[in-house]
Image (cartoon, coloured by chain):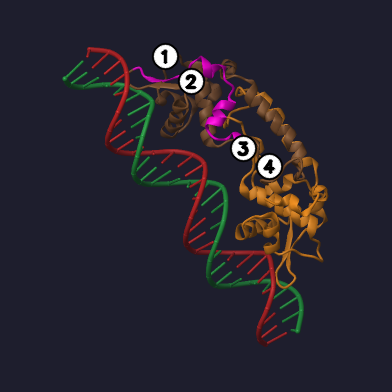
Chain colours: A brown, B orange, C green, D red
Amino acid sequence: MFSKKTEYALRATIYIAKHSSEEKKLSIVDISKAINSPQSFTAKILQVLTKKKLIHSLPGPNGGFYITEPTLQAPISCIIDAMGENEALDKCVLGLKKCSSANPCPLHEQYKKVKFQLKEIFEEKSISKLAKELKNNKSLQY
Amino acid sequence: MFSKKTEYALRATIYIAKHSSEEKKLSIVDISKAINSPQSFTAKILQVLTKKKLIHSLPGPNGGFYITEPTLQAPISCIIDAMGENEALDKCVLGLKKCSSANPCPLHEQYKKVKFQLKEIFEEKSISKLAKELKNNKSLQY
DNA sequence: ATAATTAAGGACAAAAATATCTTTAATTAT
DNA sequence: ATAATTAAAGATATTTTTGTCCTTAATTAT
């Protein structure tokens, strides 16, 4: 469904949402270990999320990443958007640029319904809600 | 959703199903033009489908690709399988290998339903049915 | 102030996906 | 038989994705 980049972004964000606060920041070392992702690559991804103010960071001792209310309330679609994969959910299954209701590919109508449901999933649940649903620490393990 | 490879495979197969027969074979030149795909790359893909007997080919003048009943009756999932993307529909949205009903990621249950519907779409409609639903020649244009 | 710690930034590397080109083999028409 | 036509096969190239490493900058604790 999504690229590795987006998968790591989602896992990291959910993990940060569950385990961090402004008082308890998480280092990239901790995060990448916890979600089983390549450290440096994950660091790049969190840089992007930080620049877009979806998460926050602070260097230095006891520094790290943390998340605040606005993002906790936001849907995970905002993470997907930040990774540039929002349009993946609009594409034609057969890869046709001109596919539309007016000029549909033979799978258009059925696939449209599924895409709609997917979008709903990603726009419905907030990040904090997902974090709370995480049953245990291992649920983000590879 | 799918890789370019799979997209081209699906478009090509549907196109062949609509426009070819054992008497009227289609050259790779015609096919790739019709479905707007890179010729040599598409040739490689059709080679795979040919090896797997999903389509057939014959070299020489008036040669080309064609399709026969067994594949016309088959669901498009067989093309997806041939391209090695069947497992894409089983993967966890967050990329977790251990994600399951017993140890679900926070999106597991909802995403499962969508995946089920997708599989249904791909297993439900036969290639010939899809070809017939192709309203006009342009419905496979990029 | 200094040292320690952590993220940011930039350059680079490896792997996978996508694509092209050239030669060979098969088939057909003449 | 020969030439023409077409797919098969193999080598190579390009682009994108994924990943690493090293240096710099910011912050904090002492």
Could you tell me if the residues under marks 3 and 2 are in contact, i.e. CB atoms within 8 Å? no
Residue under label 4, please give it.
Answer: A92
| Image position, residue A78 (x, y; %) | 56, 26
Residue ID for mark 1: A24
Tags 4 and 3 both on a single chain: yes
Question: SS of the residue at dot 2?
Answer: helix
Q: Which mark is residue A88?
A: 3
> Which numbered tag is attached to residue B122?
none
Question: Does the residue at mark 4 contact the one at mark 3 (Cβ under 8 Å)?
Answer: no
Look at the numbered discs 4 and 2 and tell me whether their residues touch, using CB distance below 8 Å. Answer: no
Residue found farthest to the front:
A102
Q: Earlier in the sequence, mark 4 or mark 1?
A: 1
Q: Are circles 4 and 1 on residues that touch, CB within 8 Å?
A: no
Q: Nearer the viewer, mark 4 or mark 2?
A: 4
The magenta segment is A62-88
Circle 4 or circle 1, nearest the eye: 4
- Judging depth in this view, the residue of B111 and A95 nearest the camera is A95
Q: Where on the picture, by quarter, is residue A73? A: top right
The secondary element bearing badge 1 is classed as loop
Residue A130 against residue B11 in the figure, above or below = above
Q: Can you give x and y, in whole percent of width and height, for residue B128 in the image? A: 82, 50
Q: Which residue is mark 2?
A: A16
Of residue C3 and residue A112, the one placed in the foreground of this image is A112
Return the disc, 4 or 2, that comes first in the chain's sequence: 2
What amino acid is found at the position of numbered circle 4 in the picture?
Answer: Cys
